Image (spheres, rainbow, N blue to C red):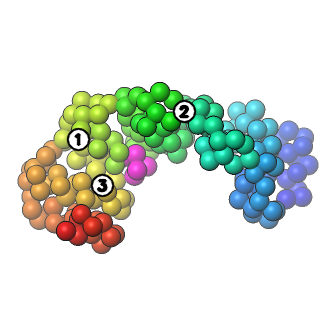
Amino acid sequence: MREWEPLAKQGNADAQSYLGFMYHSGNGVPQDYNEAMKWFRLAAGQRYAAAQYFLGLMYYHGQGVHQDYAEAAKWYHKVAELGLAKAQYNLGFMYNIGQGVPQDHAEAAKWWHKAAEQGIAKAQHNLGVFYAEGQGVLQDHAEAAKWYRKAAVQGHADAQYNLGLAYARGQGVLPDDTEAAKWFRKAAGQGMADAQY
């Protein structure tokens, strides 16, 4: 802590962001969201991506500031444009439900696609659902199955269940009861009641 503070006060964005993270998590210092916000703001003003992401997170959860979804979306957007997968996922989520931004399923799909390509399992699953339902994208069961599989192999229970359904119904893949059972079993093993049934 002591070695970071002088650097942070001199304007070093790495040090400012690190101090923000320490105060946010209570790592080595008492947890203090106001202090975290102060340091993240300084680093974010220097376009430090991690600090910008944490500002979005803090505005989203109302940590050290009044909860403000529009402000959260603004900060997520800045770092999503830079390619930060977690911000892309969060921004997609906000567009999907219209939180802080106008509801726009095509925008949600766009951001989830970017996050999915970087291996975020929740984004892969959600993109699969969008393709299966034709929400924000053209309906395409083969694309849905592709994204379900990517999330399923990472252990995402909903994706495992949905991939099982795809095999059971022959949607986007050839019907295969053995494959369906395999994926249902994996989801069931994680406590998913529908898969257990």
Residue at image point 34% right, 69% down? 190
Residue assigned mark 3: 159
Q: Name the kind of residue labelled 1 in the image.
A: Ala
Residue range in magenta is: 119-124
* On-image quarter of the C terminus: bottom left
Residue at image point 75% right, 63% down? 27
Q: Is residue 119 above or below residue 72?
A: below
> Residue 117 is drawn in which quadrant?
top left
Rendering coords of residue 84 (x, y %): 55, 41
Upstream in the sequence, badge 3 or badge 2? 2
Residue at image point 51% right, 29% down? 101
Mark 2 vs mark 1, CA separation in Å: 26 Å
Tag 2 and tag 1, C-beta contact below 8 Å:
no
Rendering coords of residue 145 (x, y %): 22, 47
Residue assigned mark 1: 132
**Mark toward the viewer: 3 or 2:** 2
Q: Name the kind of residue labelled 3 in the image.
A: Ala
